[in-house]
Amino acid sequence: MRLISIAILSLLLMLTFSTARLSCKNLFEDAHDFDAYQKTLSKEYVETKIKKALEGDAEINRWYLLTEHEFVIYASPEDKLNHRAEFTLELGSKKRPKKEFPPFQNPHTPLKGLRVAIDPGHMGGKLAHLEEKYVHMLPNEEKGIYEEIKFNEGELAITTAKRLANKLKALGATVLLTKVKSGEPVLRSNFDDWKSENFESAVAQLVLRQPDPLIQSKEALWWKEKAPLSQIFRSTYNFLDIERRAELINAFKPHVTIACHYNLGGGYNKEGYTIGTDTDYTLFFVPGAFEKGDLKDEVFRKASLKNDRSRYEFVRLLVTEDIEQSVALASITSDYTSEILNLPLAKMKGWMQAIYPDKAAGVFHRNLMLARLTHAPILYCEPFLQDNYEQTKILYYNKDRRIDEMVQIYTQSILDWTRWNQD
């Protein structure tokens, strides 16, 4: 009955917020969102945060200017050369506004008043292969796998999210699930219908990053005739679905968002079977690490400062404490994952190591769409590799054990983090 009530609540919230369109946010129209932060940040703070958390690629400094008295962001490098500011943040020492947390009133419902959004990662079901988020491992006697194993991340994530929602609600929290059923997107239009109706216009957008019409024509032909269906899905429709998830979350105005995910490491062979790996670790992603955005799917990814929405989010992440709070939450959670899962924290090359607070092993700034667009601290944990041979066996034969462990980890982490914010 509790699962049903959560599903009904989530569907009602989805309907309530279905008309909330937040994707139009941009600095030109919405600069007033940052009025309360004028004259609150020092030059040293802004410079450090940009260099250590936000600037994943040095080239993005072509979009901003930092002086002794102001931080200025521009719609393009050309505008910077011509001194046409899109947004100016005056620096100073006024008190920065902080998000208020509900006080503890009842020890039996310590999260009463706390709003928690939970996003079950990926889609699962029949879409798992398009997402390339599945495990399909053939027998491997050397690794102790004696039968064919199949499962997918989307289904693990939705089960985890529902059980976690039950736990948090029992502790008094108000919970939003962005989706309640595996195998389906958050968008109203399914992938087949979207592709039939919108693929031509999507290709037209995808090739615009190329200035040469001849190259545009060749790239359009590749998308239409040679691109694997999985790449089309992951480069277009998937980003639209993530954007919709962020819209639902932001309309809910959560104190915190939890993105339920599990990791993959070894990849697939040419037949689509999971290769498997002996490697295993836990890692966390937090917002930041903006890059210049030369990827083929940039028009749908919207990750670089070429995009007006990303410039808005860059400023939001600069002035608010969403990054610092996300790192603090990840640091709390990492203690529990290390203790309960008994796995090392990742040491990854090529990603920006988080620095807020000092204890942030295994926590990395990464410009993931959900992390960038969600207006709240986010707990984005990749707790282990599903295709690790030992984890694969546990998830196939006793998945409830692993899921319940993650629910325990998330629940205790939210409790500790909330107390930390109230001290």
Image (cartoon, rainbow, N blue to C red):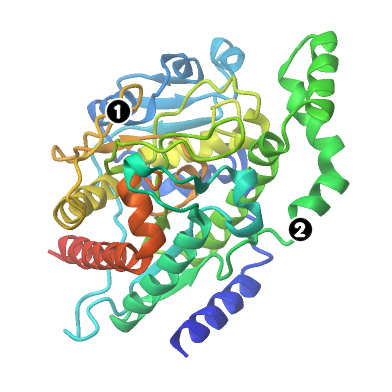
- The residue identified by callout 1 is 348
Q: Is residue 373 above or below residue 110?
A: above
Whether residue 114 is visible to the viewer of this picture, yes or no, is yes
Left or right position of 117 against 284: right
For the residues bearing labels 1 and 2, Cβ distance under 8 angstroms: no
> Residue 4 — which label?
none
Q: Amino acid at mark 2?
A: Ser
Residue 232: percent from the left, percent from the top? 71, 36
Q: In the depicted view, which residue is nearer to us: 163 or 396?
A: 396
Q: Quadrant of residue 410?
A: bottom left
Q: Is residue 299 above or below residue 180?
A: above
Crowding near the residue tagged with mark 1, few <14, some 14–19, many ≥20 C-alpha atoms within 10 Å:
few
Residue 183: percent from the left, percent from the top? 62, 61
- The residue identified by callout 2 is 189
Q: In the depicted view, which residue is nearer to us: 154 or 392?
A: 392
| Quadrant occupied by the C terminus | bottom left
Residue 246: percent from the left, percent from the top? 54, 54
> In what element is the residue under mark 2?
loop
Whether residue 383 is visible to the viewer of this picture, yes or no, is no
Q: In the depicted view, which residue is nearer to us: 47 or 165?
A: 165
> In what element is the residue under mark 1?
loop
Q: Is residue 258 above or below residue 226?
A: below
Q: Label 1 vs label 2: CA separation?
A: 37 Å
Residue 345: percent from the left, percent from the top? 21, 40
Q: Residue at x 30, y 67 (%)?
A: 401
Q: Name the residue furthest bottom.
A: 1
Left or right position of 205 against 329: right
Q: Is residue 281 above or below residue 291?
A: below
Q: Residue at x 55, y 71 (%)?
A: 180
Say which label, 1 or 2, has the lower sequence index.
2
Q: In the depicted view, which residue is nearer to us: 160 or 394?
A: 394
